[in-house]
Amino acid sequence: MSRLACIPVLAVLLTVTGCAGLPNVETSDGRPAVTTAPEAAGSGSAAVDGVGGADGGLALVQAVEQLTVKPEARVAYSRSAFRHWNAGLVEGDGCDTRAELLIAEAVEKPTLGDGCKLTGGQWLSYYDEVTVTSAPGLDVDHMVPLEEAWSSGAHAWTAERREAYANDLDAPRSLVAVTAKTNRSKGKRDIAEWLPPATSALCTYLEDWTATKLRWNLTIDQTEHDALAARANNCPDSTITYKPAP
């Protein structure tokens, strides 16, 4: 089941604590287990419905080579070019993208109150293996930061496409709930400049980064490519599939 598969239930179960159908399972890297919709299951831990190898996944080292290497665009960036957070996947449920992501990623479900106020619950920040027990203590990180996406192709997108990117709940790895400390340490930096502090998270992070760049057809510069390719060699069991963004 997708970590996001329970979100539509919110439209009719606003008084339920979290999403009862989502099991509290963790992956070997400590991150809550995720896949995509049942019909789109792949073999990789960064499975994203769509393109992959014959076995349902593409080796990470091969996926890296599918990325387009191109110098970053030097175009003035404004965070306001990416509208977020919007109403999320379930319009009218009172929850925005951030709240829906937190509900879906919780390993112990929070109580959902009026105005989508979340109380209680528990989350595991896979970047640093820290357990968080309060929703305000979490940041929702864009796997590929907005400014990095901007210089990698998003500067040429429409405002609507940038909004879709910034609120991408249709793929299981585009957004991730992590500690504010690690999110702010990462900032706008790419793979060549920043990696999560938990060694158990490294291969998962490389998978997530590559899947997101492929999904949104974002480019990588040569330094980023070289760093990603070198580190991917240390993750021989990592595979991904991805679905191109509409």
Image (cartoon, rainbow, N blue to C red):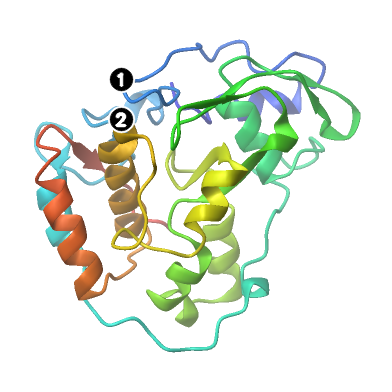
Locate residue 73 relative to residue 21 in the image: left or right.
Answer: left
Q: Residue type at mark 1? A: Ser
Q: Identify the residue under disc 1.
A: 28
Q: Is residue 62 above or below residue 190?
A: above
Which sits earlier in the primary sequence, circle 2 or circle 1? 1
* Element under disc 1: loop
- Front position in the image: 215 or 176: 176
Q: Residue at the location (55% across, 38% down)?
A: 178
Q: Identify the residue under disc 2.
A: 200
- Front position in the image: 135 or 17: 135
Quarter in which the N terminus is drawn: top left
**Answer yes or no: do the residues labelled 2 and 1 have beta carbons within 8 Å?**
yes
Q: Residue type at mark 2? A: Ser
Choose mark 2 or mark 1, whichever is in front.
Answer: 2
Locate residue 180 relative to residue 116 in the image: left or right.
Answer: left
On the question of residue 47 being in view, the answer is no
- Front position in the image: 204 or 163: 204
| Place of residue 230 in the rendered image (x, y in percent of width and height, measured from the top left) | 12, 54
| Place of residue 31 in the rendered image (x, y in percent of width and height, measured from the top left) | 42, 26
* Image quadrant assignment for residue 47: top left
* Element under disc 2: helix
| Place of residue 28 in the rendered image (x, y in percent of width and height, measured from the top left) | 30, 20
| Place of residue 10 in the rendered image (x, y in percent of width and height, measured from the top left) | 71, 26
Q: Residue at the location (54% across, 88% down)?
A: 76
